[in-house]
Amino acid sequence: MPSPQNPNPCAVEQNHPQFLELQQYIDSLHINPEDPRRKDTLIMTLHRAQRIFGYLPEVVQVYIASRYSIPHADVSGVISFYNFFTTTPKGKIQVNVCLGTACYVNGADKVLREFEQVLGIKSGQVTPDGKFSIESLRCVGACGLAPVVTINQKVYGKVKPGDVREILEKFFIDEQTDVKEAVNG
């Protein structure tokens, strides 16, 4: 039973609504544990699970493996093979700094350091409030705009360290607006 202080679905296992949603999805696939082709829908299930939970922690992986009647290592192997899947939580606002060759040569490492300093976290981490996360990427395919930053799929090109605060300002303003509305609402 989830406690009000700990809404994390992974801490309360299968009784959490997110697990129930995943269970319902897997049930709809009518997986036969004896069918050698049962893993044909595993990637679709992992996509759905990541949409539901935001990431694929071990407890979710083990749950999926048990529902498919396959070893956890099979599920973990698929997750580690595809870059789309993540086993770490992401922030509501996902900052990605490209460190591909063109971006790096144009100062992306300095841009990344500025994002880390302003947000108080390192690449691969999430702010304590869960609002922001930072990741470094190898290439986003926009080399002509180097250095490139994406925030929740929006592309920012030719970013300089001095641009970081201005880019993040909108997100900080939105956060303050949310707080004011909650207090006054």
Image (cartoon, rainbow, N blue to C red):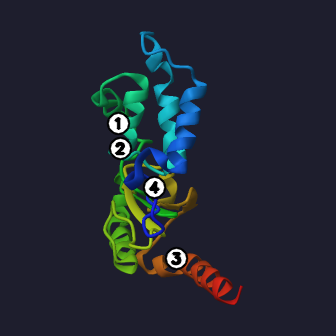
Tell me which label, 4 or 3, sits earlier in the chain: 4
- Residue at x-position 48% and y-position 68%: 4
Counting other residues with Cα less than 10 Å from the Cα at mark 4, is it few (<14), some (14-19), or many (20 or more)? few
Residue 96 x %, y %: 44, 59
Which quadrant, please, contains the N terminus?
A: bottom left
Residue type indicated by callout 1? Val
- The image's mark for residue 168 is 3
Tell me which label, 1 or 4, sits earlier in the chain: 4
Residue 174 x %, y %: 62, 78
Tell me which label, 4 or 2, sits earlier in the chain: 4
Element assignment for label 1: helix
Q: CA distance from mark 4 to mark 2?
A: 16 Å
Closer to the camera: disc 2 or disc 3?
2
Question: Residue beneath label 2, please?
Answer: 59
Q: Do residues under tags 1 and 2 come within 8 Å of each other at their CB atoms? A: yes
Element assignment for label 4: loop
Closer to the camera: disc 4 or disc 3?
4
- Residue at x-position 37% and y-position 38%: 61
Residue 180 x %, y %: 64, 87
> Residue 129 falls in which quadrant of the image?
bottom left
Answer left or right for 58 relative to 180. Answer: left
- Residue at x-position 36% and y-position 56%: 99
Is residue 6 something that shows in the picture? yes
Element assignment for label 3: helix
Residue type indicated by callout 4? Met
Tell me which label, 2 or 3, sits earlier in the chain: 2
Question: Residue beneath label 1, please?
Answer: 62
Residue furthest right in the image = 185
